[in-house]
Image (spheres, rainbow, N blue to C red):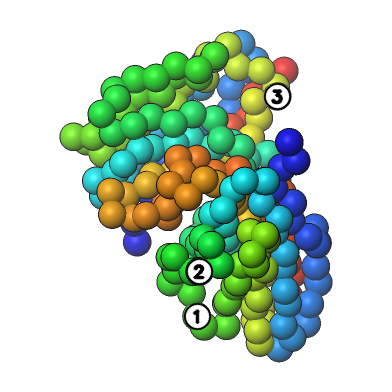
Amino acid sequence: KAGVTQTPRYLIKTRGQQVTLSCSPISGHRSVSWYQQTPGQGLQFLFEYFSETQRNKGNFPGRFSGRQFSNSRSEMNVSTLELGDSALYLCASSQPEGPSYTFGSGTRLTVV
Amino acid sequence: SQQGEEDPQALSIQEGENATMNCSYKTSINNLQWYRQNSGRGLVHLILIRSNEREKHSGRLRVTLDTSKKSSSLLITASRAADTASYFCATVALDGGNQFYFGTGTSLTVIP
């Protein structure tokens, strides 16, 4: 079966702009989680969506938001981009109670 | 932060040798999982060990868990060049829903 698909693969944005990243989970997986990975902070949890509802949220500013659609696809939005938002953004899907994630290949965001 | 720590940060071995990496975490957990990440890509689930288990095997992988010390180790036997990657432990807290806390990672290089 198809894996977790993230688009785009690479993105370059200018400081102050906004960006939307997309994630299509494995068919049948209704939980989608997002992580930010940077060399300095490692993997940081952003949020989790299940049945179109945000079920869990990490410690990120309100500029980071997301949503989930009825087909379980999820989008993540970052507004007013800052240089520090440059990172690999990973999406992972799972069954509602886990136990393990299947990750996408990530979106590499560079803010200049 | 509930993020765990891994030791060593980097490990370089010859092909055929065994590689051991350790993970320490901070909270009571439901389970602990190990993931592998090839450079700049998504994470791949390797193995899961539940809090009531002490040891688990999967192919060339052996995982141990000591909940009293809040630590786990991952042993890769007879390493291959293809094992070169970063390895992360991830914990799911008892009250953490589906939120994973990832360790800082061990970068493993296997020299052919």
Residue at position x 81%, y 72% from top?
A12
The type of residue carrying mark 2 is: Thr
Q: Is residue A15 above or below residue B77?
A: below
- Residue A100 appears in view: yes
Same chain, labels 3 and 1: no
Q: Residues within 10 Å of mark 2 (few under 14, many from 20)?
A: few
Name the image quarter holding residue A65.
Answer: bottom right
Q: Mark 3 sits on what residue?
A: B82
Q: State the image coordinates of residue A50 (x, y, percent, origin top left).
A: 51, 60
The type of residue carrying mark 3 is: Ala
> Distance from label 3 to label 1 (Cα)?
38 Å
Foreground residue among B78 and A72: A72
Disc 3: host chain = B
Left or right of A20? Residue B33 is left
Same chain, labels 2 and 1: yes
Query: Quick one: which residue is furthest to the front in this view?
Result: A70
Foreground residue among B96 and B87: B96
Q: Mark 2 sits on what residue?
A: A53
Q: Residues within 10 Å of mark 3 (few under 14, many from 20)?
A: few
> Distance from label 3 to label 2 (Cα)?
39 Å
The type of residue carrying mark 1 is: Pro
Q: Mark 1 sits on what residue?
A: A61
Q: How many marks on residues?
A: 3
Left or right of B2? Residue B61 is right
Helix, strand or loop status at disc 2: strand
- The first of marks 2 and 1 along the sequence is 2
Q: State the image coordinates of residue A51 (x, y, percent, origin top left).
A: 53, 62
